[in-house]
Amino acid sequence: MSRRLILTGNDAAAEAMRQIDPDVVAAFPITPQTELMHKFAEHVADGEVKAELVLVESEHSAMSATVGAAAAGARSMTATSANGLALMWEIVYIAASYRLPIVMPVVNRALSGPINIHCDHSDTMGCRDTGWIQLYSENAQEVYDNILQAIRIAESPEVLLPVMVTFDGFIISHTAEVLEALEDDIVTKWVGEYDPKYTLLDTDNPMTFGPLDLQDYYFEHKRQQMEAMREAPAAVKKIGKLYGEISGRQYELIERYQLDDAEFVVVALGSTCGTAKVVIDELRAQGKKVGLLKIRCFRPFPETEIAEAIKNAKAIAVLDRSVSFGAPGGPVHKEIKAALFGTGSTAGLVNYVYGLGGRDISMDHIKQTFADLETIADSGTPTDSLRFLGLRE
Amino acid sequence: MREKTWTEIPIGGAIEEAGNADAYETGSWRTYRPLWNEETCIHCLRCWVACPDSSILISEGKMTGIDLEHCKGCGICAFECPVDPKAIEMKLETDVKNG
Ligand code: SF4
Ligand code: SF4
């Protein structure tokens, strides 16, 4: 039995957290994440969860408290956005390095400055190399589903890495949607008892976390983290399949929407995928061979699956909601380009930067993108490989 | 000690074995070496109390020597030694090695 609820993305995340009932949650407010923890704090105040809620004085402390709790053997969570994530960056890197299976919803918001509270992906893309697994969500349903799966992914013995579940600020976080939530007892069984690999509180087996690691062993520890990332895709897929069995909603690393015979492909992540799907349905009805590659799991980057999914396309548009300043293209674009290297793909590849600071992306923008792709396919390689959607030029 | 490969060590830099700092030779960092003079030592054990690296070796209430595998050469023991002339003298490692 599942429950149909009307929830915002933030409330969906808080609902998942209520059902997970982690041992420790550290919280510091930042728009647009604030309401997520506000809602969770209500669950704590109402006695619906047993979680220890630690109200800290900054995001740096939020992640520090989460790391400390996780090292002590507690199932630990926190959540943040934008500058909050930037402030906790130092400890974000440490959480992954210490192999602590923390789960953190991140409500995507543009990094300052100038100060802006609306959605783009500069925050989570900025820490794509911190060693965290990153799952991007298309809507409130996926926020809920991804958080429940993230616990199992993070705690998989062959993985033991923290997981960031991202969703678009305001577009998802503050929009009410109908979604299906699982019953409490099913979630309790799904997440199970947390059995930490190490715990500082086990006095019979005293151990040390975070000692000095110099020229002699630091390199080996980084190699281990790389291996955990290499194990992660199989875990994400296995857990996505198992989740399908209890929810009816199966998840993979990527979603192939009308992709099998697609000649013109848009690559995106987050809420824009929803917009793209509506456009694709319209264009398909007109007989156009268009499709979407949605990247759910950006870290680890499922290179082989992605290359396989788009290698026969005639033209590909990669949509980036952030900028990698000075680099040849946005973060998603660069990875797609690298994934296609050696596949023999002759597709015209174009990068569209869009939606910075919450600038709206409309169906017309995506229609324009597909129209551009047809032109590119007719004329060969695009002369300009970096374009903008919604920018006043 | 043979250094282990990445598949042989605990993940995340965790140390599973309590007290294994003993196996880590930190004495090589030293600039000055404490030289103990058994003749003038009165076995007050002030140096043993003060040493931050637990490198003063004792047995049955008497000082027996200095653990040079862990002593980092801070000189606190020599500073604290109450006898005159001091029973611990700090000497440059290079001078000790070069005789
Ligand atoms: S020099 Fe410092 S570390 Fe070495 S024995 Fe003396 S007090 Fe201990
Ligand atoms: S402080 Fe000096 S006299 Fe006292 S035990 Fe140490 S070396 Fe001997």
Image (cartoon, grey):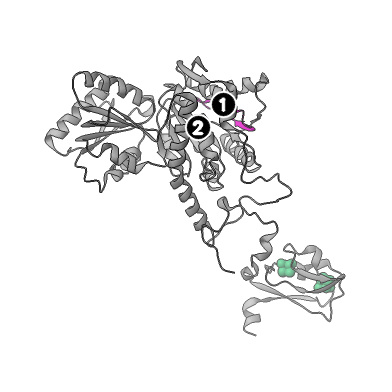
Residue A184 to residue A153: above or below: above
Ligand 1: give its quadrant: bottom right
Position of residue A318 measured from the top left corner of the image (x, y, whole percent): 29, 34
| Quarter of the image with the C terminus of chain A in it | top left
Dot 1: chain letter = A
Q: Quadrant of residue B81?
A: bottom right
Give me the residue at 56% from left, 57% from top.
Answer: B9
Indicate left or right for A125 with B98 as reference. Answer: left
Position of residue A216 measured from the top left corner of the image (x, y, whole percent): 54, 62
The disc placed on residue A149 is 2
Q: Main secondary structure of the magenta part?
A: loop
Q: Give the residue at mark 1.
A: A187
Question: Mark 1 belongs to which amino acid?
Answer: Val
Residue A45 vs residue A49, the one in the foreground: A49
Please identify the residue farthest to the bottom as the structure is shown: B99
Dot 2: chain letter = A
